[in-house]
Every structure is written in structure tokens, then in C-alpha cells.
Image (cartoon, rainbow, N blue to C red):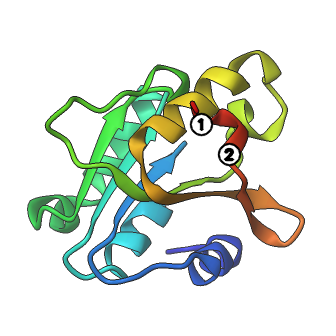
Amino acid sequence: MISNRLLAVLHALPLKEGIRVLEIGCGPGVLARAIANQIGEGFVLGIDRSDKAIQQAIKNSTLEIESGKLAFKKMAIENFKLDSTEPLFDLAVAIRVGALDGRHPELAHKAFANIVSVLSKKGKLFIDGPEIIQEIDLMHFKKN
């Protein structure tokens, strides 16, 4: 069951058929599953620093994982990297992630730099904000 808050986030995201989405701080995977079911043949990777959250997300996402549309990984965003064979993401979303919302400013620079490195050239980042979600301008995190 998806909460009204996450449902509002889901509807506010610019989701399209076939895109690749990174959910940062996915918790038990509720939003990641909902996104996977909205993007057709796209792909969602949910990451979270909590073992318990990732275990719960995997347990509750059997169908989506088996279909190849969804995967989960225990990883903090400030340590996240793609290997050179993995395609970039079109969109990243983070709801209540301390490294991105100001609660852990010491992690912010590395977290934003890692997000920029895994997004496509036109990739976008959305975090929770005063208007459900807000797009973050990543220009000053990109290398010239």
C-alpha cells in the first residue's frame, strides 16, 4: 500500500515509458515498486544504507525483481558508483535523505557529485520539498 504522500510524489515525477530511475533512500521499496509499475520496460534501482530496509524491499518486490524492472542494493549515496558497463539513469529521486536535505551537510558534496556522475546528460534529480517534490539544479556539481 502506498501512502498519499508517496502517491503525490509518484504523480509529480516526470515518468516516461522506458526510463531508468534511481531511488535514493528507498526504504522498504514502496515508491520504487510504484515507479517500476509506471515506466513500462524501464528500470528502477533502489538504494538504501539500511540492511533491514533492503531486505524488506526485496521481500516485497518479487514480481518486479523477477521481471527485470526493479533491483535493490544496500548502498549509501555518498558511496554509490556505477561500473563502466551500466547505463546512466534518466531520473533520480530522494525522499527524506539526510545527505541531500541538509540534515547531514558533511555528506552533501560527495552525494551530489555521485548523483551527477550516474545521471545522463539530461538527467534530473528530485527531492522532497515544500511543493511535494522539487527539481534540484545540478549545474554547480558538474565538472566543466
Q: Nearer the viewer, residue 22 or 66?
A: 22
* Residue at point 10%, 61% (across, down): 66
State left or right for residue 68 relative to residue 16: left
Say which mark, if any, is on residue 125.
Answer: none
Q: Is residue 124 visible?
A: yes
Q: Which element type, helix, strand or loop, lies under badge 1?
A: loop
Can you tell which quarter of the image residue 3 is in? bottom right
| Distance (Cα) linking label 1 and label 2 | 5 Å
* Residue tagged 1: 142
* Residue at point 41%, 72% (across, down): 35
Residue 142: x and y in percent read: 59, 36
Residue 26: x and y in percent read: 49, 48
State left or right for residue 102 relative to residue 27: right
Question: Disc 1, disc 2: CB below 8 Å?
Answer: yes
Kindly give the residue lying farthest to the top in the view shown. Answer: 106
* Residue at point 62%, 34% (across, down): 112
The answer to whether 124 is drawn above or below residue 55 in the figure is: below
Tag count = 2
Residue 74: x and y in percent read: 37, 30
Q: Amino acid at mark 1?
A: Lys
Q: Badge 1: how crowded within 10 Å, few (<14), some, or many (20+)?
A: few
The answer to whether 56 is drawn above or below residue 64 in the figure is: above
Q: Is residue 28 visible?
A: no
Kindly give the residue lying farthest to the right in the view shown. Answer: 130
Q: Quadrant of the C terminus?
A: top right
Say which mark, if any, is on residue 139.
Answer: 2
Q: Which element type, helix, strand or loop, lies under badge 2?
A: helix
* Residue at point 13%, 61% (across, down): 68
Q: Amino acid at mark 2?
A: Met
Q: Badge 2: how crowded within 10 Å, few (<14), some, or many (20+)?
A: few
Residue 124: x and y in percent read: 56, 59
